[in-house]
Each structure stands twice: as C-alpha cells, then as structure tokens.
Amino acid sequence: MSGMGVSNPAVTVAIPAYSPRYISQTVDSVIAQSFQDFEIVVVNDGSPETEALELALAPYRSRIRYIAQENAGGAAARNTAVQQARAPLIVNLDHDDLLYPDHLRTQVEFMLRHPDIDACYVNLEYFGGSSLDGTCWMAKSPS
C-alpha cells in the first residue's frame, strides 16, 4: 500500500467527515481494497463530535492523512481533501460510504483504459436501515 510512505500514489481517496457514524467502516472498506496503491485523506469539517470522530479514526492515524478545519460544508471539506491529494486520480467518498473490495481496481482500470474520460461514478446501493436498503441508485434515478 502506498498510504503515508509513498509520495505518489495512484489514487487519493477523499473523505469529508462531519459525523463519526460509519467512519471506521468506511476506512476499513478502503483499506480492504484489492488495489492498494492509494492514500486516504480524511477532512474533519468542524464536527461537533470531533472527539468521537478522532477516537474512531485513532486506529487508522498511521494509514490516513487527517485534516481538521472549521465547518465550511461538505463541498469545502471535499475540496480541502482534493487540494491535499498527491494522486492523479481522486475517489470521493462520504463518511458513511462503503466500497466493495474491487472498487478501486475496477475504477482505476476503467480510467486507464479510457484516458479521454475525465470522471466516472458507480451505481450505489443503499444500506443503513431505511426503506431503500438494497435498492440501487440507478434503479431509482437512471443516468
């Protein structure tokens, strides 16, 4: 894994965080990727639960870059992560997103095969105890 030790990973995973809910699972899902040439940048967007967020991230501190900033909204926190990125490819996650184990490999391979494409996204699947659990985004909002 590139992570903290290598200056030029292939992918930066940018994670703005305002809540500690699911952040451990999100980071675990990134660390468990079959493709390991990445870095993780987590930006605390002025969370009122900073203590709990930092406690949840403590086991990962050697594997992530952690940045705390005043609350400016999710887009500003994502922009901070992107500005700190060392990789040419960016994967944007929210603090409550989970990746399937081949997610990064699949997206990186796609982007390398299609250098004319600037962005790609996936068909997310809802989870977390709502009536949408198990439903895919494209089933509700096709591209």
Image (spheres, rainbow, N blue to C red):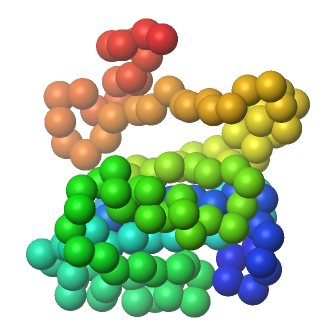
126 relative position to 41: left or right: left
Considering only vertical position in the picture, is 116 above or below 60? above
Classify residue 6 by image quadrant: bottom right
32 relative position to 58: left or right: right
Q: Residue 135: x percent and y percent?
A: 35, 24
Considering only vertical position in the picture, is 31 above or below 53? above
Q: Can residue 27 be seen here?
A: no
Classify residue 17 by image quadrant: bottom left
Image quarter of the N terminus: bottom right
Q: Residue furthest right?
A: 113
Q: Residue at x 23, y 62 (%)?
A: 72
Considering only vertical position in the picture, is 32 above or below 105? below
Q: Residue at x 68, y 32 (%)?
A: 118
Q: Residue 79: x percent and y percent?
A: 44, 57
Give the total of numbered labels: 0
Classify residue 140 by image quadrant: top left
Q: Nearer the viewer, residue 87 or 133?
A: 87
35 relative position to 44: left or right: right
Q: Residue 91: x percent and y percent?
A: 58, 50
Q: Residue at x 27, y 68 (%)?
A: 45
Q: Residue furthest left?
A: 48
Q: Nearer the viewer, residue 52 or 76?
A: 76
Q: Residue at x 63, y 61 (%)?
A: 12
Considering only vertical position in the picture, is 88 above or below 81? above
Q: Can residue 143 be seen here?
A: yes
